[in-house]
Image (cartoon, grey):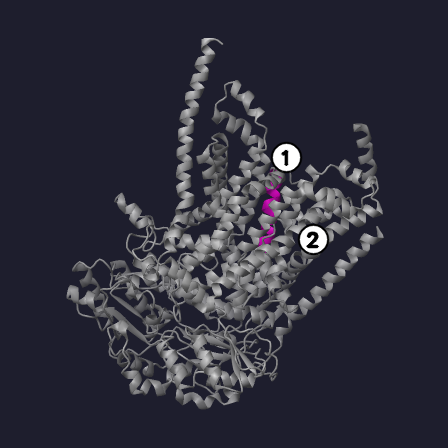
Amino acid sequence: MNEQTVNRRADAGHQIRSTHKLASLLLFICCVYFLFPVWWLLVAATKTNAGLFAGAHGPIWFDNNFALWSNIKQLTTYEGGIYWRWLLNSFLYAIGGGIGATTISVMAGYGFAKFRFHGRKLYFNTVLGALMIPTTALVIPTFILMSQFGITDTIWAVLLPSLLSPFGTYLMRIYCMGSLPDEMMEAARVDGAGELRTFVQVSLPIMTPAITTVFLLSVVGCWNNFFLPSVVLSDTKLFPITVGLTQWQVKSNAGAGSEQVWNLITSGALLSVIPLVLAFLFLQRYWVGGLTAGSVKA
Amino acid sequence: MPSVNVHHIAMRSRTVSRKENAWGWFFTAPFAVIFLLFLVVPLTYAFYVSLFSYTQLRGTVFSGLSNYSRAFTDPIFIRGMGRVIVYAVVMVPVQLILALVLALVIDSIKNRFSSFSRLAFFLPYAIPVVIGALMWGFLYSQQMGPFTSIFGIFGMKAPAFLSPDGIFGSLVNVVTWQWTGYYMVILYSALQSVPQEIYESARLDGASELQIALKIKTPIIASSLVMVTVFSLIGTLQFYTEPMILRNNVPSVIAPEYTPNMYAQALAFNYNQLNYSATISFALGLLVVLFSVVFMRLTRHQSGLED
Amino acid sequence: MKKSMRIASTCIACLSILLVSACGGADSGSKEANEAPIHSDAKANNNAKCQNTIKKQGVEKVTVWAWYPAMEKMVDTFNDRHDDVQVCWTRAGSGQTQYQKIATAVKAKSGLADVVQVEYDVISQYVSGVEKHIVNLNQFGADRLSNKFTKGVWNSVSLGGGKSVYAIPVDQGPYIMMYRKDIFDKYGVKVPTTWQEYEQAGKELRQKGFQGHIGNYEPSGNGSNVTLIAQNKGKVYEYSAAQPDKVGVNFTSQESKAVMEYWQRLAKEGTVTTDDAYTAEWYKKIVDGSWATAVCASWLVGSLRGISGADTSANWKVAPAPTWDSSTPSVNFGGSSLAVTDQAKDTKMAAKVAMEFFDNPDIQQIAVTESGLFPTWTAILHSDAFKNMTDPFYGDQKINNVIAPVAMAYKGYDFLPFQPYAYDEQTKVFTDIVRNGADVSGSLQSLNTTLSNYATQQGFTVKQ
């Protein structure tokens, strides 16, 4: 090893260290940016209305009056504790819609990837096209169609449309194409396994990372769902949390006949984001794998 | 062995066995039903509805494609469309560049702080868009938000986030805050799946980390970048929830027809013009598909979105 | 091959069935009808879902959408006293969000409640043109009730005081001025009684070191801006049941111009702010002493509950709204009524609920004290108990001595059958006038043109 190389190494080392410092600073600034609103929510959830409007210590520090517990108590009594019902509904819609959408997408992705059938090309291209259609554009026509069948204002009006996941199907197809060799399926068939058994016993286990991804993405999609439920539901007992909290916001902003429930909005918002945040932080490892499969060309 | 394979594939591509055809449809049938019921039928219906016009005194009459000629000459629709295109031009690169930079940085420094950062950046994605927008509505408030006092420390006046001049940047910020972490995670995981040996040889050749990031890592994850761009493009053209929620804070700054989607909603629910609303929705859908197709054509090599 | 063809054709068949059933609904609204239809199915609501708990089983139910505070308590009281009918209530939204629910149910031709709360400014849009979604209650004897209510609101529910009655009044919003006595005292400024004094007092407060403003002009205030112009005898919107095909739009009158020039000047001078109304920020500024007055409807006090403690030094009083001159009329902003819809399952029973729901001293008591509604019932307005009522918010001032006369003197005014659209356009133009200093005459002229064109496009004749 001559002197020059050593110098170059040292230079590089120095450079790396200073780049590291700069990079760490960038990460720190971004952490502040991304976490700051969350911190605000955490603080705001502990305030009364008066505290939110004119409390001591400003918006990013706790008021003298720590009202988180009384806010939570108020959430359990206000309008008969409907908040908890909304939270439960959101879980139901998210889990139910997630399982349904995943099942359908997994089957369809597998079908598209592994079987040549008539009309497949056209069919799949239509699915790709569907990825681009603004879903909000479909809300009003969907609503009118549902009302013809009398399913508006029922849980089905929220659950059934959330079963549609062109993106999940697309992701599953890519994954199946990349990770399920035809030879393996042939081998299973030669061993006398039927198509269903091959699917369940051979293919599904391999598809697990992608399934987790599609499931979590669908869950988030359903959890986020706002426009459609706000149109198809009138019964407040069926609202998901997003629609419910927005209704409280509108109620607080209504002018005539309004009630100021900002403290319930902030504490309700905080409580509602906790489950999903935790789920994501702990499950991150499991679901990012499938996402990569979809993006890196197989 | 390879020759057998080729032969096999060639055989298969010529004939489709009855059995395979049936199984293919079996697996895709549930999707087809949902796809028909909740996409094709509503879309067809929206198109059908858009062929009629409703006025309060004359009721509903068939008007053919005249709603479409009205839409494409409607200054409100055109302005809304222009607005979301400007949003797309600004917001998509901002999110993408930030997501890419953060993904590259986290990928190159692997320590506890960087894994904490990864979680922190991703956190907003787990917060529903509605609630995120509600939160920012508070934060932007001159009276109730923190920025008045934060800027006050430096003797400055906080920017008027919700003024006509500030609203554009404020909405870009809400979306950036909510989605950048998600895109970053996609890009980061793409980086993770690249074998480390590729970088090692570059390092031995004396390439700096920055050079490796720009010249090796970024091209490798190009397909992920394209996918993320398409998502963010489609999302932006459909811009709806964030301005809708912030509108409750500043109704005079964000007009009811601020974006095409909001316009369609106002027409249907506030102005009693369902038919024209369907036209706007349909026209918007057409334009979004057009934009996405053009974009994917341009980036066909990287996208992996071809059959 | 054949199989896939069969599947494909089945799908097409499914699709066409769906489309036919869907399309059937699309154009049936074109039939000409003079009145909203009535129905008489007493059992249709047996399985209706209600937000309140109904204790009496096997009794006919009437579904109601309303967003009054303390509604559940009023519903329970009503249900306790009735054995022939039970109210099944839902809070389907507040204001605009509930109207959206009405709009969707109308499109779907199902799912609408029997009785709905509607504000006075939206009634005409449900009864004009070929589609009528609110029932004329005259056929159920509602016209006999006219003496029970103040003249102004009766005018509003009958769209011009004729024979038709489209809703039963509940509350109203007499236009008054709330002011911070402590602020006026501190700076030694006289509380204004006219708009000229208001401008002077505003300047004086600023000169004497008051950091806030005397008040706020809300370009997005919708009805409140119509009210401000009405106070100067400007009649911007005209519509009556007597001439259902005609509308009047008049923003170009001297009266309208004078009002808008006034607010433009005050905004330009920095005497008033021009914040948007009914946002969290706006409520905060009302309670934290940023504004020394709020010229508004009397119901505003009810909305401040829960936040009014934010500034403990506040000493609120109520006074009549500033006037232009001695002939300035008493005006009103907001308030609402109960209407019966064309989807009411048993129209007669629904009409009974609309007419009788608030016709009970106990419920009126809850409405006034707990919901914070300002009554439209003349009996209450005249009662000593009401006149002597004090409100701790106003330092136990006998506020109804100020507010009740405004309510009694209000004559009512009209709203367009496409009022939500008119409000949105109004907001754009008023914003431009007070924030950007746009030319008043030109802006009002273009607003007039926009609304007239829209009216013509919807098939109405515009009065010249």
Percent of width and height locating residue C156 = 42, 80
Q: Residue at x 52, y 21 (%)?
A: B203
Q: Are marks 2 and 1 on the same chain?
A: yes
Residue receiving disc 1: B301
Name the main secondary structure of what is drawn in magenta: helix
In this rendering, the answer to whether C102 lies above or below B240 is below
For this view, does C135 lie left or right of residue A48?
Answer: right
Residue receiving disc 2: B31
Q: Is residue A194 visible?
A: yes
Name the secondary structure under disc 1.
Answer: helix
In this rendering, the answer to whether C270 lies above or below C78 is above
Name the secondary structure under disc 2.
Answer: helix
Task: Specify the amino acid type for callout 2.
Answer: Phe
Q: Which residues are magenta?
A: B283-298
Q: Residues within 10 Å of mark 1 (few under 14, many from 20)?
A: few
In this rendering, the answer to whether A68 lies above or below C361 is above
In this rendering, the answer to whether B38 lies above or below B196 is below
The quadrant in which the C terminus of chain C is found is bottom left
**Residue placed most toward the observer, C28 or A198:** A198
For this view, does A41 lie left or right of residue B201?
Answer: left
Chain under callout 2: B
